[in-house]
Image: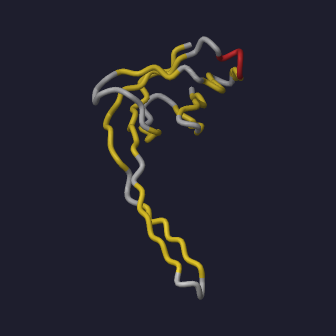
Amino acid sequence: MYAVIRTGGKQYKVSPGDRLKVELLEGEKGASIELSDILLVENDGNVKIGKEAAGIKVKAEIVSQGRAKKILVFKHKRRKSYRKMNGHRQYFTELLVKEISA
């Protein structure tokens, strides 16, 4: 059994027991969360898409809140003495998928 969920503007394929890092969600470590934006659910060959999967929820637990590794953004224009460097660290929430309830 697996589901395709949408959170933070991205789509993820999840099944019970999976750990995944998503964009920052509110909640503390150990809190339970329900994801209701379900795009697709597959259970033993039975596939539900879109409105058919409307009442299905994915229950997950927040494992940790954190920040990803720093990425460097470097802008440069040749022969113009223009160089600019910037860094960015994205916040994330790590989830442990408990169950997909139909």
Residue under the point 59% across and 37% down:
11
Q: Please tell me whether residue 23 is drawn above or below residue 53 in the rendered image.
A: below
Residue nearer the viewer, 57 or 73: 73
Give coordinates of residue 28: x percent, y percent.
Answer: 29, 28
Question: What residue occupies the far left of the structure in this picture?
Answer: 29
**Left or right for 4, reference 20:** right
Residue nearer the viewer, 69 or 63: 69
Image quadrant where residue 44 sits: top right
**Left or right for 6, reference 70:** right
Colouring of the image: secondary structure
Question: What residue occupies the far bottom of the structure in this picture?
Answer: 79
Image quadrant where residue 13 sits: top right
**Left or right for 91, reference 2:** left
**Left or right for 36, reference 52:** left
Q: Please tell me whether residue 41 is drawn above or below residue 82 in the rendered image.
A: above
Image quadrant where residue 52 sits: top right
Give coordinates of residue 81: x percent, y percent.
Answer: 52, 84
- Quadrant containing the N terminus in the rendered view: top right
Residue nearer the viewer, 21 or 42: 21
Give coordinates of residue 85: x percent, y percent.
Answer: 45, 70
Residue nearer the viewer, 29 or 57: 29
Residue under the point 56% across and 13% down:
102
Give coordinates of residue 78: x percent, y percent.
Answer: 60, 84
Q: How many marks?
A: 0
